[in-house]
Amino acid sequence: MTTRVLNTLVPWRTMILRGARVLARCNERGEPTTGPDGRVEIRYKPKDPRAYRAGKANLEPAPDAGEILPDDACVQAVAAPDKKAVAAERARSLTHAADAYVVYADGACSGNPGPAGLGVVLQDGMVRRELSMFLGVGTNNIAELTAILEAANAIEDAARPVRMHTDSKYAIGVLSMGWKAKANIELVQRTKVALSRLTDVQLIHVPGHAGVPLNERADALAVQAVKTESTTGWLTY
């Protein structure tokens, strides 16, 4: 990973970001200054070299901001690692037992609600099965849950480990973390029942649209279903 050193010689001002006091890059008038990405460099502590980026609209002057501070009020910055990129790299480097089913399940929706579809990639050793299914009008959460349901129902040997990847924190929450479902209650219950027949199943969060190959493939299958309004059925490769 390349470390990016920030060396912008502009001053600082104490500001409020979502209730927290931060030091934000500013101009000589104390107005937040944006970089090429349209965001403002901030620090939570002057001696902490980790630099973060914040939207200008989310920053407010602190009531007791005081004078504008010089550039050297904070130590030289190193950009904080991108959390999504770190999570994607962790997902790409995961290893599973040789006999495990490795599953990536994703949903897509054009509008929310709107035409919805799902995509599933089920890797069983050297054999890969894929499903692209159109669901009609639905929500993104319905598509995500149904993708997991279809994947669970496709597992042939319930005694083998199943590692189910999804980029839906909602699905993981209502299925395995005790979140109370306020909608899709019947679908949540059916999906829980399908998962419960599997002896060793884990739901694993993977960041979406972050270059994780099989998750990108599941997403493409879901988008294909929405665009074509069609279902392929399970295809084996």
Image (spheres, rainbow, N blue to C red):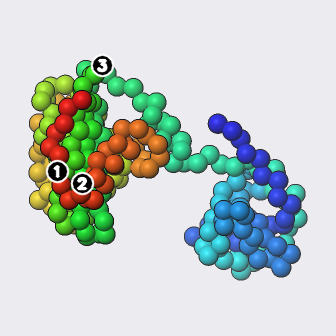
**Of all residues shown, which one is farthest toward the front?**
228
Q: From the viewer's perspective, tell me whether residue 222 is left or right of residue 71.
A: left
Please state the horizontal and vertical placement of residue 114, each as a whole percent of the image: 25, 69
Q: Secondary structure at mark 2?
A: helix
| Identity, as a three-letter code, of the amino acid under mark 3 | Ala
The quarter in which the C terminus is drawn is top left
Q: Would you call the spot at circle 1 few (<14 residues within 10 Å), some (14-19), or many (20 or more)?
A: some
Where does label 2 land, which residue? 225
Dot 1 or dot 2, earlier in sequence: 2
Earlier sequence position, callout 3 versus callout 2: 3
Q: Nearer the viewer, mark 3 or mark 2?
A: 2
Q: Position of residue 17 (x, y in %)?
A: 62, 69
Rendering quarter of residue 55: bottom right
Residue 201 visible within the image: no
Badge 2 density bin: few <14, some 14–19, many ≥20, Cα 10 Å? many
Residue lying at 77% horizontally and 56% vertically, measured from the top left: 46
Give the mark nearer the N terminus: 3 vs 1: 3
Residue 98, label in figure = 3
Question: Do the residues under discs 3 and 2 have CB atoms within 8 angstroms?
Answer: no
Percent coordinates x, y for residue 212 in the rendering? 43, 40
Q: Nearer the viewer, residue 132 or 151?
A: 132
The residue identified by callout 1 is: 231
Which percent across, then down, holds residue 79? 69, 49
Q: How many marks?
A: 3
Q: Looking at the image, do the residues carrying marks 1 and 2 touch, with CB atoms under 8 Å apart?
A: yes
What residue do we see at 12% from left, 30% from top?
156
* Whole-number angstrom distance, CA of label 1 to CA of label 2: 6 Å
Camera-near label (3 vs 1) is 1
The three-letter amino acid code for the residue at tag 2 is Ala
Residue under the image location 51 percent in, 48 percent down: 84
